[in-house]
Amino acid sequence: MNKKLYILFVLLGLIPATYLLFLTLLFGWFILLEINLSNLLDKIPILFCFSLGICGYLVLLSILRGLQKRYYKLNLMLLGFGLLGNILFVSFIGTKGAWKRVLFGEGDIVEWFVGMSPNFISLTFIIFILTKMYKEKNEK
């Protein structure tokens, strides 16, 4: 893939992910300030989803430099964590009808793009890395 196209492709997911990271850190901070023993169990799943999302962001940031063969497994794991964080957040913490908005793009298209673009890019890289690993394994 052309280097400029590769960077543009990663940035297509990284720019919206940066906005989501800012929101995650902002709301995560407020959640941490509100934690007490009575609501601790309610806040742990949210913080867990936020942590997984941050892992996904960090790997998108590292992928911007280029994919290195020695980091394929780590990248796969962190990309999977990011996707898992999104799935868990939408499933358990999202408002009623969140999956309908995610799957069918109901509502504001910009909001949908910001939420889904990093996930599409992550899924594309997961497929790409798995394909490369499979080809390398079969060549040996």
Image: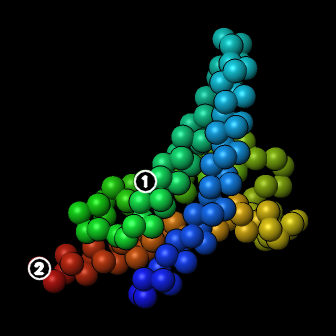
Residue drawn at point x = 40 percent, y = 76 percent = 128
Is 63 positioned to the left or the right of 56 in the image?
left
**Residue pushed farthest left?**
140
Label of residue 70 in the image: none
| Extreme residue toward the right, this view | 107
Q: Which mark is residue 78?
A: 1
Q: Position of residue 103 (x, y in %)?
A: 73, 68
Q: Quadrant of the N terminus?
A: bottom left
Is there any visible trace of residue 53 in the rendered image? yes
Secondary element at image label 2 = loop
Label 2 amino acid?
Lys
On-image quarter of the C terminus: bottom left
* Foreground pick, 47 / 28: 28
93 left or right of 82?
Answer: right
The CA span between labels 1 and 2 is 26 Å
Q: Is residue 80 visible?
A: no
Residue 5 at x, y percent in the picture: 50, 84
Q: Which residue is mark 2?
A: 140
| Secondary-structure class at tag 1 | helix
Reading the chain from its start, which is encountered first: label 1 or label 2? 1
